[in-house]
Image: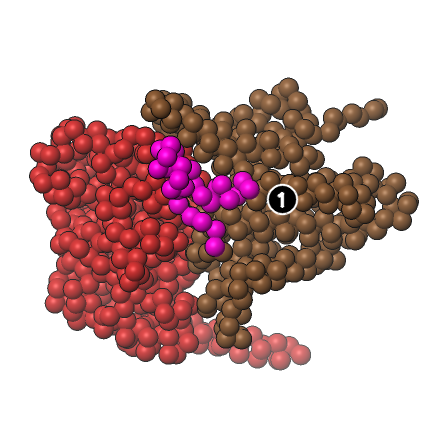
Chain colours: A brown, B red
Amino acid sequence: MNPELLFFFETVIGGLMAGVMYSLVALGFVLIFKASGIFNFAQGVMCLFAALALYDFMAPGGWVDRWFGFTFPVWAAIALTIVVMIILAWLIERFVLQYLVKQEPIILFMATIGLAYVLEGIGDILFGSDVKPLDVGIPQGASDWLWDNFNLYIEKLEIFAAATAAVLVTVLAIFFQRTRIGRALRAVADDHQAALSVGISLRTIWVIVWSVSGIVALVAGIMWGSKSGVQFSLSLIALKALPVLILGGFTSVPGAIVGGLIIGVGEKLAEVYFGPYVGGAIENWFAYMLALVFLLFRPQGLFGERIIERV
Amino acid sequence: MMFKRIVGTLVAGALAAVFTVSTATAYELVMPSLDYRTGPYAPNGIPFANGYHDYLMMLNGRDGGIEGVPIKLVQCETAYNTKQGVECYEKVKDTAPSRSLIVQPLSTGITYQIIPKASVDEIPVHSMGYGRTSAANGKVFPWIFNFPATYWDQAAVFVKYIGEREGGMENLKGKKIALVYHNSAYGKEPIRTLEKAAEKFGFEFMPLAVDHPGQEQKATWLQIRKEKPDWVMMWGWGVMNQVAIKEAASIRYPMDHFLGVWWSGSENDVLPAGDGADGYLSGAFHAPGDTFPVHDDIKKHVYDTDKALGERDRIGEVLYNRGLIAAVYATEAIRNAMKIHNTKEVTPTMVRDGMEALDLTEDRLKELGLPDFTIPVKVTCDNHAGPRKVAIQRWDAKAKKWSMITDFYDTMNDIVDPLIEEDSSAYAKENNITPRDC
């Protein structure tokens, strides 16, 4: 194949794969916003916190190892981290959200900013600030088969992340569409008051949705942690998810995926083909610019619910 | 009632007088540490801060400080944020009793911001191997020091090393050398030197910026895969280093042709890449490891007495040793100042004199428990960058160890000196500074 064309394909595929990684983070935002109207600023820190907890359950020298003299296998560590994220969701609801039920969205948003700092601080105290190499068995490096047969460079980790994202979205779709709790979540998302009037407990729903979001954060934390090691810069991946949300819409799960793919491809193509003319390092702001251009035409995002306000 | 009030006032006055006298006699040497133990760059900031802290605490424990005068370590968290760093500087600079004797900003961005402030406040700043390179010119920057070498020296040494590996500098012609750099004041520092070197030796220079924090670098490494540079240099920090080394391993870039600045050459940077990082190279100006006598003293006087902030098994990591040597330079300058001015109650102005008279010989390093740890350093009034020599170290992924693989290379004076002169002269002109006679 023509080397230039091959490079173009590689850039597009690399962008799609990076986009999936952004989508994994964006999904957590969408779940909470959809069910409660809260923009959870702490989502990035939740990814970090989940990855830190997971590492500590399975790594020599972690809390478990120091206290009990053993570590858990990967599957058990993941299960235990899910439990930790559920407990965290309950604590957030119990000590933060329940006191702010009737407050304006901006107050809830501010509370999540505070939550982000608290979680980051607790993470630092409990798990330390070192870089933690995370190995849960996800294959790393370039795919040998694609490299040898097509001279294509695609990361095995990113292929795995794409497959995981597909499974995650399917599971979430089944959860929302086919389960009682899922229907209750959608009811709350549509109209809090109406949902309350038919006996749906808002507090229980919030715990569930924050738990699900915590599990999604764990998945994102595993992928990003496997890529760069678990470290505090993981909390900044939320910034990568923001343009995805603007583009895909804050309330749409498919939007988070499609938005991630568009942002991923857009920023990589921009960096590779336009970056050299303007000094490079444009992908971060280009992602926001791309999202803002979409915003001009569809303020609710590609898949977001149309905002209709009657006065 | 009146009598009681008078007695009370007299007693309070007497106590205040006693307190004043006692504080006046208990002089302390204020040494601030602008740390970053939080935020995305904490994994790199912590070992440096621990090395700095531990050496000072060891001196306090073993010798009662410097020449018997206790050190007062004042820590301030910058989170590697320039704004916070400047706030820290303002907060610590006038700390009693001595004022800050020497400030180590541990960030090029912060250094750039406090250069004009420190010059007015008359507080010496040591940006050890970072910061504004042209501060090497002591005639223009009397308060700023950047020994033992600058970024421009390091870039020049890298070119020299690459030339040597290619079989001679003449073989650099037609080669392609990429620079993957942190898109910040720090990362941009070596660009001019490398452009000049490219002009002189005829290689193609390919700068590639990576935005903060550098968690995602796919586009950068796709370009490297496409352009196939013969060598890649890196000026990275924090997560950028780990991701870059992993990406390089993924695109099967040969690690023995990938050369990082000394801030991209710690254990933190290579461990996440596992075996893929084997053979990765970086600049260095001191040895790694905890096998030096000074480390034994630190373990005895700091770790055994529960005064440590870090973990015992991390003593001797590259960045720990860097913090330690920074503390050695600072304390030796203070010791010098005491000798020069014949007083133990030194001030920042005196310490500046001590810095300019620093002559850390091999014998002195041995006395300090650091034999063969680093090269001797001599600072003068006009040369604030010291020896300007750089060595190369290599990572062994199996042994999980760094080891020095070369001797120290001299800088390329013909490239770097004119750049220092040009930049410092421009700074002097912009700021109406008349260069000192040295």
Q: Is B130 contained in the magenta span?
A: no
Left of A129 or right of it: where is A278?
Answer: left
Element under disc 1: helix
- State the residue position of label 1: A168
Q: Quadrant of residue B55?
A: bottom left
Quadrant of the drawing holding the N terminus of chain A: top left
Left of B115 or right of it: where is A233?
Answer: right
- x and y percentages locating residue A43 in the rendered image: 61, 46
* Residue at the spot 80% in from the left edge and 43% down from the top edge: A183
- x and y percentages locating residue B307 in the rendered image: 41, 73
* Residue at the spot 40% in from the left edge and 37% down from the top edge: A146
Q: Is A160 contained in the magenta span?
A: yes
Q: Quadrant of residue A169?
A: top right
In this view of the protein, which residue sits in the foreground, B199 or B341? B199
Check disc 1 and give the amino acid type: Leu
- x and y percentages locating residue B331 in the rendered image: 26, 64
Highlighted range, magenta: A137-163
* Residue at the spot 46% in from the left edge and 31% down from the top edge: A13
Can residue A91 be spotted in the picture? yes
